[in-house]
Image: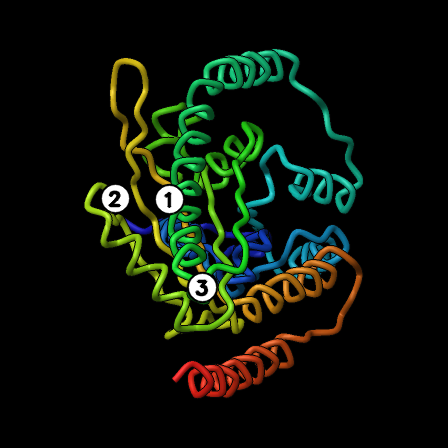
Amino acid sequence: MTRIMLAKGGKSMTAEIICVGTEILLGNIVNTNAAYLAEKLAASGLDCYYQTVVGDNAERLAGVLKCAMERSDVILLSGGLGPTEDDLTKETVAKVCGKKLSVDDHSMERIADMKDQFSQTIDPILRMYNAAMCATTARLEIIEDEFKYRKLRCPIHHIDTRLKSAKSILGKLQKKDLDLTLSAACNNIYDIAGVRVVCSYIKDVYLIRDRLMAQDDIHIMEIKDYIEQPKGNGYRSLHIIIRVPVYFMNKKQMVPVELQIRTLAMDLWASLEHDIKYKSLYQDVTMDFSDELKECSRLIYEAEEKMEVMNAALEE
C-alpha cells in the first residue's frame, strides 16, 4: 500500500533527485540510479517533481543543491561519493549546509585494510593483463612488419598502450557499485588492458580488424562500430573487446583486452574534444561547445573520405 508522507501544513512531501557524474553527462554510462530512486519514492508516497544531472563540478553542484533546497522537502543524491579526486558530493553538501564532515575512524580502518588487501593481491592480475597487452601489441607489430617486408603501404601509423592502475580499477568498481574484489574486476571490467591502433585511412581500420579476426586463437567478445554509428557527441572509433591467449609456466589464460582502432583524424578530434569538454566541466565555464564539436567531427570525417578517394586513385 502506498504511504502518503506529509510535510508541515498537511501538504504532501516533495522529493528531488540529483545525480552527480561527468560520465552521465557525457553519455558514457546510463543513469539507472535515477529510475530506481524515482520508483522507490513513488512507492513511498513521495512526489518527485525534479530530477537533475550535474557534472563533477563543485560550484555547479552547489547551485543545483541550493535550488533544490528551496523547492523540495527531501533531496536524494547519487554519485560523486567515491574515492577519486572528482568525487565532490560530500564536501559540497557539507559546505552548502554549513556543516563539517566528520571521519568515522572504524570505517576508515576497514577501508584502508580493504584497499591494502586489494592492492597486494592485484599485482599478479595486473601482470596477467600486461602480458595480454604485450601479446596483442606483438601481433599488431607482426602485421606491421609483414607490410613493410612486402614493401606495401603499412596501414598502422602508430600503436599506444594503457594499463589501468589499482586505484583506477578500484574507482571503477565503486562507480559501478560492484564488490571490491579481484573476481568482480576480472568479470566486469574489460578495459583493464587497452591497445589503441591509429591508422592513416578509414579502410585501414577495417583491414586491421579483419587481420586480427582471421587469427583463430583470438576470441571476439564485443564489437562497437562508432565509425559507422558515431556517439552522440561526434566520437568515432572502432572498439573491439578480444580475449587473447597468454601462456604462463603451467597454464594458458584467455585475457580480455580493449582494442580501439581509429584514424589519425579521429584520434586528433578525440584528444581535442576531451581537452575542451573536461575544461568546461571542471572549470567554472558556462559555454557549451557540443554542437560545434559534433560539426567538427562531421567536417573531419568528410575530409577523410575525400582524401581516401584521392589515395585510392594514386594506388590504382
Tag 2 and tag 1, C-beta contact below 8 Å: yes
Q: Position of residue 60 (x, y in %)?
A: 72, 58
Q: Which residue is mark 3?
A: 155
Apparent side of residue 182 relative to residue 269 in the rendered image (left or right) = left
Q: What residue lies at 75% left-to-right and 43% top-to-bottom?
A: 97
Q: Which residue is mark 2?
A: 218
Amino acid type at image mark 2: Ile
Quadrant showing the C terminus: bottom left
Residue 188 to residue 228: above or below: above
CA gap, disc 3 to disc 1? Answer: 14 Å
Camera-near label (2 vs 3) is: 3
Closest to the observer: 167 or 6?
167
CA gap, disc 2 to disc 3? Answer: 20 Å
Closest to the observer: 204 or 176?
204
Amino acid type at image mark 3: Pro
| Dot 3 crowding, Cα within 10 Å, few <14, some 14–19, many 20+ | many
Q: Which residue is mark 1?
A: 139
- Write down the quadrant of residue 206 in the picture: bottom left
Which element is circle 2 on? loop
Which element is circle 3 on? loop
Q: Position of residue 57 (x, y in %)?
A: 71, 53
Q: Earlier in the sequence, mark 2 or mark 1?
A: 1
Which element is circle 1 on? helix
Q: What residue lies at 73% left-to-right and 55% top-to-bottom?
A: 282
Q: Earlier in the sequence, mark 2 or mark 3?
A: 3
Q: What residue lies at 70% left-to-right and 43% top-to-bottom?
A: 93
| Dot 1 crowding, Cα within 10 Å, few <14, some 14–19, many 20+ | some
